[in-house]
Amino acid sequence: MNIRFISAIFLVALTGFIALSYEICWIRIYSFSSGSRAWVFGAMLGTYLIGLALGSLWSLKFQDAKDGSNPSHLRALSLFVLGANIFGFLVAPIISWIVPSASEWLVNADLVLILPLATLITLPLVGIAAALLGATLPLICHFAIRPDEKVGARLSYLYLANILGSGAGSLLTGFVLMDNLSMQGICVFLLVLGLLLSIGLAVYAQLKVKSLTIQAVTTLAIGTALAYNATLIFDGLYERLQWKHEYKEQGAFKMLIESRFGVITVGQDNKIYGGGVYDGTLSTNFTRDSWRVRPYFISAVHEAPKEILVIGLSGGTWTQILVNHPQVEKVTAVEINGAYKDKAIPQFDSTKSILTNPKLEIITDDGRRWLRMNKDRKFDVIVTNSTFYYREHATSLLSNEFMTQVNDHLKPGGICIFNTTGSGRSVKTAAEVFTDIHLLLNNVVASNAPIKLNKGNWRDALTAYEIDGTPVFDLQDEGRRSDLEHTLSILDNIDNPDVDIDQRLWSKEVALEHKGYNPLKTKDQRIITDDNLGHEFPHLPTLVSKFRQRLDARGRD
């Protein structure tokens, strides 16, 4: 191998690194903007691969030169690579500028159900960028490989180098850069690599010193200008992607944390979001008719909840409430996103004390894996602080298999609580797995034994409840005594159809008769399993039903 071919090996490895690194970045952008919708990854990846294929096909138009080593051709390639990397650098901010306007148009057109389309309409940007990046590899191969008897071997070397570079890009960007740099920092880093690649191709072309100097200086000037203005270009990136048409009203985030696990944001109203989706409110205050009644509810259905497992720590609000329960002796919290514990919670005044609470053990792990690896651990209460049912991977916390796993870790008479987020299928699944269930607001309360409501035990627990030394209900205050009685009245209104949702408590029978977002009653819906993902497309049944109604109406006409 001569020095020129070795240089080509390095260059194609670098193209693979850059292309796959951008893919990782764009996946994060689309996942965040869509709220981690399950189908977005496939749509984005499909667009990216189509772009690579079209770029490779398009490169054929530039491969008809008889002399592949002609400097003019290689110089053109270096300029082409320069343009491709500049465009790749700008894709993320351009997407964030388009999404708010597209969202506003959809809202004004009363098309809220398909609001994620505001993100999808930007996919052509990914396709174009991928096509530009995808054309680089075959063009370098064309100019680097001589048409002789060793053409096959040389091609294999270049493709191997490209694969190694691509793998390195995925690993280094996904596990190292995203844990240490912001999206802006990563894109600037990739821009610099792309510009170095462009200069490298110019050197490879063996241009005259004057031509090479002019091109190198021009490239560096462009790179310096973009890098210097990167803060301005990327300013408000995640705010626009998350708030969309409400961007101007909501304003800048109070807190933004990026890591290899994802993106954590906190709005000015102290609401915390994970991956662009609402996680909860950073407050343990139990106000009248508050939905925060759910973690406080465990003493209403369990006489002595001493050991609790929490799957999903997030900002720590629910864990703070549970670990301060007057009857609880130990809480084990399992959270897959280590950034919540290490970077977010230490900054939250309402929950940072859990990090020093001796009753709490926080484990960074996948909840299902931890359960599988700790088969002998049994709990009085297991709280699954799950996310919206239509997000990717939500199945892993709502499926029949997972609920069976949870049921196996409950002590006799143990309680499981999880958020259905409106999914009737998850309610049906719980009813199939557990002996008994109730529906509290939008949370399933399930048990391996018949559930017995205990108003006296709940009153005692709420009366004794203190968080960081502050009583949850100050009984010296007449208003708070009234709030306590109002909260306890939830147990008196079981199956009452006239109460508001923040006072709703349904038995198993009533819950299974409910329809919710699905045209079918809960009892008639399919259960969720690890291998059926229909619940991740939440509005599909409604859209199909409306479409059929329109067809029927036309048929009658």
Image: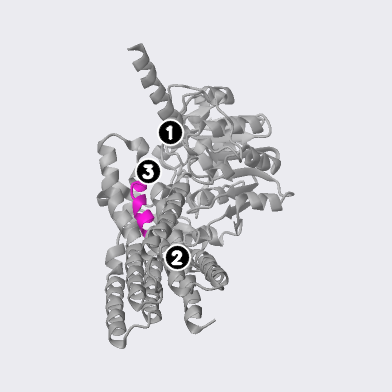
Residue 424 painted magenta: no
Q: What is the distance, in whole Å, between disc 1 and disc 2 at their CAs?
A: 43 Å
Q: Label 2: few (<14), some or many (≥20) within 10 Å?
A: many
User: Mark 3 — residue?
Assistant: 116
Of the image marks 2 and 3, the number of the one nearer the N terminus: 3
Circle 2 sits on which residue? 138
Residues in magenta, as a range = 119-129
Labels 1 and 2: the sequence-earlier one: 2
User: Which amino acid, mark 2?
Assistant: Pro
Residue at position x 35%, y 65% from top? Answer: 84
Residue at 58% across / 37% down in the picture? 532
| Residue ID for mark 1 | 539
* C-alpha separation, residue under disc 1 versus residue under disc 3: 12 Å
Kindly identify the amino acid type of the residue bearing the numbered disc 3.
Pro
Assign a secondary structure to mark 3: loop
Q: Are marks 1 and 2 in contact (CB under 8 Å)?
A: no
Q: Is residue 127 above or below residue 294?
A: below
Majority secondary structure in the magenta region: helix
- Can the viewer see residue 293 in this picture? yes
